[in-house]
Amino acid sequence: MHMRIFIVLTALALTACGGDRGVGLGPIGYGSEATLPQSTRTEVEMIGLEKLPLYIFAGEPSPSAASTAGGSKLRGKDANLVVEVEGTTYAMRQIEISGSNFAVVEGGAPVASLPRVVRARTGCLIASAPIKAKSSTVYPLDCS
């Protein structure tokens, strides 16, 4: 008897949680249209990951400007974060030009998981397809 009361109370509590959003114990599609969250911003906590060094410049924001920003000074190992991805070593840095952000990755050819590593180490989404420069790949970032 006590088990039946517990099951009924649990079922009622779960059904009440669904409200009018189509979530609960009813059949699929039960309830009204689901509502989307007001904000689609995602916050990522980078536990144990070192962020890419950030360099800020003024000027016209473009991937080509980001790849050459800072000249040879930023191509040195101490100016970049060296990361190994799928057996390939990359030197990475984040460049901000007039509020626009880019990740500059130097090293071998880009591997499939490189965008995921860039997202994890910058905390930004990749805004569009990367641009391949002479010796680097530039990822436009959306850090908003």
Image (cartoon, rainbow, N blue to C red):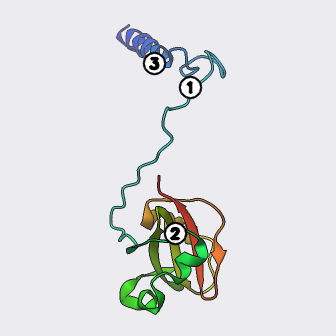
Q: Is residue 11 above or below residue 68?
A: above
Q: What residue is rendered at 66% in x and 21% in y?
A: 29
Q: Earlier in the sequence, mark 1 or mark 2?
A: 1
- Residue 56 coordinates in the image, percent (x, y): 40, 71
Q: Amino acid at mark 2?
A: Phe
Q: Amino acid at mark 3?
A: Cys
Question: Which of the 4 image quadrants contains residue 52?
Answer: bottom left
Nearest to the observer: residue 35 or residue 39: 39
Residue identifier under label 1: 35
Do the residues bearing badges 1 and 2 touch, measured as CB atoms within 8 Å? no
Q: Earlier in the sequence, mark 2 or mark 3?
A: 3
Query: As drawn, is 132 to the left or to the right of 139?
Result: right
Where disc 2 sits, the SS reads strand
- Residue 23 coordinates in the image, percent (x, y): 55, 22
Say if residue 86 shows up in the picture: no
Crowdedness near tag 2: few (<14), some (14–19) or many (≥20) residues, C-alpha within 10 Å: many
Q: What residue is rendered at 54% in x and 14% in y?
A: 20
Q: CA distance from mark 1 to mark 3?
A: 14 Å
Q: Is residue 130 above or below residue 78?
A: above
Q: CA distance from mark 2 to mark 3?
A: 43 Å
Q: Earlier in the sequence, mark 1 or mark 3?
A: 3
Say if residue 120 shows up in the picture: yes
Q: Nearer the viewer, mark 1 or mark 3?
A: 1
Crowdedness near tag 1: few (<14), some (14–19) or many (≥20) residues, C-alpha within 10 Å: few
Residue identifier under label 2: 102
